[in-house]
């Protein structure tokens, strides 16, 4: 009877010990993941996902179970004592809870990436990363947003995406209070306060907070324009510039004024428009005191004081202080008349000329009404 109770207690202790080890493994990996940045994974954010951590912990727990089968499982008090000692990283001194998490952590320093993709040359430090990456080749996106229908390859990315709809921003900056939907966005934002700009352009020595910003900047040197419009032949160096351009073709105007209902394709145009309703003219000319809604309007105004005319006609030697005036002038050379009368079809180079012309039809209509009333 006593031996049976002893065996039962031993099994229960081993199960509790395994559960405790797995739990602590998971906590240690989550802490490591916040500091670890793998520059190569395709579509993987700096922030490690909980799903990937689960894969790693499950794999390591299987190895741990095999070790426990081969050797006697120590009591919970013995295991806790060993954990107090810990496993120290020889590179950075970090203390890990067990040899498995230490082995995983060491790959950060050695650059070891034992898990290779069978479709391309990319390799990864853990099988979780590899499994997620391979979905980019298979096109598998099993996780679908029930709000907008957008699909994702991993569930954690769907959870982050849902914050767009709920407007949830759980990560707040302790310096300024600004909040973010993603922890990686908060980490990047914090560099604004710390002044850390670790990514340097070797062409012009400009510094950047993120590798993505540096990559986009480098295209100004290489003149690379990888983003092509699907409606015309125009190409852009930035993906965001392409998206804004394509709204010309689609007619999309996602930024709508709540005051008057007017829509805009550019957010900057929308913000400038809102100042019309608020009356805010924060950009003031130091020469004459005149206020303007945007910095661009002020800059153009200042050219009247300086006499600067930076816009030169490509057909003749005339120069202009405003781009819009240049465009209007060049229609003399091209013969373009984009403003057409809806009444008679006559077209004009300038919208002001069309407005004057429309008064002719207004007068005609007024005379017709008067003649009808007379009879």
Image (cartoon, helix red, strand yellow):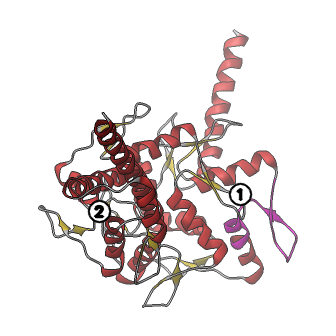
Q: Residue at x 75, y 49 (%)?
A: 276
- Asked if 135 appears above or below 221 in the picture, the reply is above
Q: Residue at x 27, y 43 (%)?
A: 141
**In the visual, does 294 lie left or right of 348?**
right
Q: Which numbered marker is on residue 127?
A: none
Q: Are marks 1 and 2 in contact (CB under 8 Å)?
A: no
Indicate the position of residue 75 as horizontal and vertical percent values. 39, 54
Q: CA distance from mark 1 to mark 2?
A: 32 Å
Residue on which the image places disc 1: 177
Q: x and y percent of residue 237 in the render?
A: 38, 69
Closest to the observer: 182 or 248? 182
Q: Residue at x 21, y 48 (%)?
A: 139
Quadrant position of residue 29: bottom left
Question: Is residue 47 visible to the viewer in this orientation of the structure?
Answer: no
Residue assigned mark 2: 42
Camera-nearest residue between 204 and 314: 204
Q: Nearer the viewer, residue 121 or 91?
A: 91
Q: Quadrant of the N terminus?
A: top left
Tell me the element at label 2: loop
Magenta residue span: 280-299
Instruction: Please identify the residue farthest to the right as the structure is shown.
Output: 289
């Amino acid at each position: 009877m006593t031996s049976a109770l002893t065996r039962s207690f031993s099994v229960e202790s081993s199960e509790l010990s395994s559960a405790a080890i797995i739990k602590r493994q998971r906590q240690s990996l989550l802490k490591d993941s916040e500091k670890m940045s793998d520059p190569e994974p395709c579509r993987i954010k700096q922030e490690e996902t909980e799903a990937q951590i689960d894969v790693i912990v499950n794999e390591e727990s299987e190895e741990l179970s095999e070790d426990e089968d081969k050797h006697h499982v120590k009591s919970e008090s013995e295991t806790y004592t060993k954990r107090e000692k810990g496993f120290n990283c020889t590179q950075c001194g970090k203390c890990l809870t067990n040899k498995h998490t230490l082995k995983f952590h060491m790959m950060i320093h050695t650059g070891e990436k034992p898990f290779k993709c069978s479709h391309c040359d990319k390799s990864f430090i853990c099988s979780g990363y590899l499994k997620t990456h391979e979905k980019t080749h298979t096109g598998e996106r099993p996780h679908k947003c029930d709000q907008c229908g957008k699909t994702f390859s991993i569930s954690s990315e769907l959870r982050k995406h849902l914050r767009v709809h709920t407007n949830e921003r759980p990560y707040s900056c302790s310096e300024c209070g600004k909040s973010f939907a993603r922890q990686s966005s908060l980490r990047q934002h914090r560099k604004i306060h710390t002044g850390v700009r670790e990514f340097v352009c070797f062409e012009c020595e400009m510094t950047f907070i993120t590798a993505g910003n540096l990559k986009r900047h480098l295209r100004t040197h290489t003149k690379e324009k990888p983003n092509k419009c699907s409606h015309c032949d125009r190409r852009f160096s930035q993906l965001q510039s392409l998206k804004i351009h394509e709204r010309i073709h689609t007619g999309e105007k996602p930024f709508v004024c709540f005051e008057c209902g007017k829509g805009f394709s550019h957010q900057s145009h929308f913000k400038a428009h809102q100042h019309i309703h608020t009356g805010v003219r924060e950009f003031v000319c130091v020469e004459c005191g005149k206020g303007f809604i945007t910095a661009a309007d002020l800059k153009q105004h200042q050219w009247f004081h300086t006499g600067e005319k930076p816009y030169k006609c490509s057909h003749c030697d005339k120069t202009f202080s405003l781009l819009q005036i240049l465009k209007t002038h060049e229609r003399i050379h091209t013969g373009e008349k984009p403003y057409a009368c809806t009444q008679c079809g006559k077209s004009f180079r300038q919208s002001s000329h069309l407005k004057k012309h429309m008064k002719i039809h207004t007068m005609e209509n007024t005379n017709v009404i008067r003649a009808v009333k007379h009879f």
